[in-house]
Amino acid sequence: WQLALPAGTERAVAQRAASVRSLMRLVTTADGLAALKCGGGYRSLEPDGTCPAADGRSSTRQRAAPSYGVQLESLFRFALPKSSSLTLLDVSGNNLGDVGLSALGGALKLNRSLRRLEIDNNAAGVDGLKSINLALKGNKKVHSLALPDDDISALLAAAAARYKRSLSDELAARQLLKSAYGRGGYCNHAVKQRGMAALKSAKQEQARARVAKDKLRTVCASLQASVLRNGEVATITAAGKNMRAESKLASEASKSAAKAQGKADALREANKEKVWLGRHKLLDAWVKHASVLGKRGHDVGWFGEWRRAWGKPYLNPAALAAVQKRMPAAQREEWEALVLGAEDTFASEETLDARVQGLLQEARMHRSQAEFHAAEVQYHGMLSEKDPRAEAPPRLEAGIVRTEPPGKERPGQFGSGYYTNWDARRNWIYGELRTAMAQPPPRDYAWKGAAAELVPAAPAASAPMVSYPKPELPRAEAAVAKAVAKAAAVPEVSMGTPVYTATAVEEDAATAKSAAAFATAAEPLPYPAMLVKGSVYEASAAGRVASRATSGPPPAVSPTFELPAAPAAPAAPAAQQAQQVMLVAVPPGVYPGMQLLVAAPSGGQVQVTVPQGVGPGSQLQVAIPAVASSSRGSSAPPPPPPPPANPA
């Protein structure tokens, strides 16, 4: 309900009166009326922040501003006490004055539905604010009332102007007193009496200005304390309802956290075997490619050395970085396709890991919210045990600055009795008055707003009853920084147990980030590894165990299986007795009865026949002579080991 009628005409006054009568009928008859805004255009301060009423007069803009004025007194006296649904009333900018605010204070003593009130820019005085304050001491329902900062600023500005005028009047009165005395003890008593009366009046005016300022600040502090008390009472009253709402939110947040955690675990578990099968296939493809390059005459011994040092049946980002370090520059083009394929595979793994981390972050966020709401439940539970009737208004500092009036000397400052230096005293008082006139008034004559002016009088606020938890942050960035800073190798983890220590390699930033993301995560094997005595896997594993014997507890190494006993055979030459046994994975597309070419660790090649019962993806044991012939001879493989418990 916005007033937009011109001011200063009889018709406008009549229309405003009719509008007030309509407002009275609306407030008394409308049961569902919750908010009423009937603001006017009156402003206590000019747009530049100055106070037009500092000199005791109002500006032309204020006189022409449309406002209800004291006509709203009828609304306050006869309609507002009967309203039971109105919770918000905005009467700002209506130039109510002390009369209108006193009527509003009387209505607040009877009304119990109002919760929020706006009363700024109403030419409020100390008496009007005191009426509102007295009403709120008994009415504990109004918990939102912003102090009329513009009105308070205007009142303090008027008091400051009054104080400055009193200083100039005092200086003029003292100069008049000085002129009453002449040579030889001559004194013009009429002039002296006028000077004494003017000095007394100036001193009284200074005192009135200081008293008006102190009284206004005291009333404002008391009014703000009443509003704060009402806010605390409203919080205590609504504590039970808020506790139930926070409990519901905490339950929902806990369910959301459990749901997100379950999704993350399910996604990780569903793709774990797929990821590791892909890594095994990557290494198989590299082994086949090395075999092809060896047939073409390329030197692939570096690959065999890396594979023996690696000792794992799969490829991960750290292993890819290490093999790229050993790769000769001349062969990089031959291996480029495999490198790109491995990088694409690891990129897809990073995408999957990002999805998992996103779900985990969502779970952490919901857990933090659940902890916060649980703390709120505890807080509101403690509030619900308090008695709202026992709440007292807090004590607020009014911000009054105690200063000595200018020109007040100390006892004995200029002598005493017959020995008083009257000329020095008079000149010092003149100087003090001129200095005070040139400087701004004391700082408590300016108003900065209730938030900056009124502070609790207690020395320090007590600790909160509930310490709210801090949200849990992801540790991915810390893990990456720690992995990059470490100069030594990072141990791989299989179900939380260190398996081996990789060789330390220099990695660029992208490789370090990828390696850290996978090296610090769990890397479970899809099936138990088998270390056969005499194989390169057993030798490399034994060397790693020995190297770690002094640095920490021995890692968990897969069990070593003995080869099945072979039937007795005629004695063979010493060169043929020295042979090596290794595990060979049957590649896809190779079936029982087909020939398979195996690359020996020494660089030679052995041709074997796939026995019955061994298919693609299975493993078979191949006896490698000490000096493998480069010719393709047939070798009968030993019987295959029993299938693993969890085949890949």
Image (cartoon, rainbow, N blue to C red):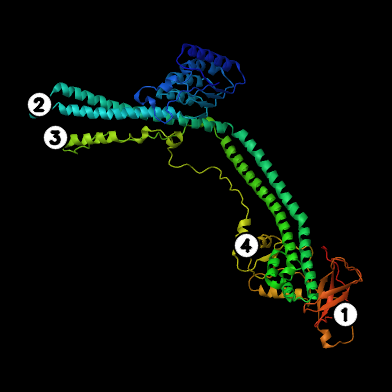
For marks 4 and 3, the one nearer the N-term is: 3
Distance from the alpha carbon under mark 4 to that under mark 3: 90 Å
Q: Quadrant of residue 604?
A: bottom right
Q: State the residue in front, 375 or 612.
A: 612
| Residue count near mark 3 (Cα–Cα under 10 Å), binned few <14, some 14–19, many ≥20 | few
Q: Quadrant of residue 216?
A: top left
Q: Nearer the viewer, mark 2 or mark 1?
A: 1
Image disc number at residue 509: 4
**Percent position (x, y) of residue 359?**
69, 49
- Quadrant (top left, top right, bottom left, bottom right) of the N terminus: top right
For marks 4 and 1, the one nearer the N-term is: 4
Q: Is residue 396 left or right of residue 90?
A: left
**Percent position (x, y) of residue 102?**
45, 20
**Percent position (x, y) of residue 314?**
75, 66
Image disc number at residue 417: 3
Q: Nearer the viewer, mark 4 or mark 2?
A: 4
Q: Nearer the viewer, mark 4 or mark 3?
A: 4
The residue at which mark 2 appears reads as 186
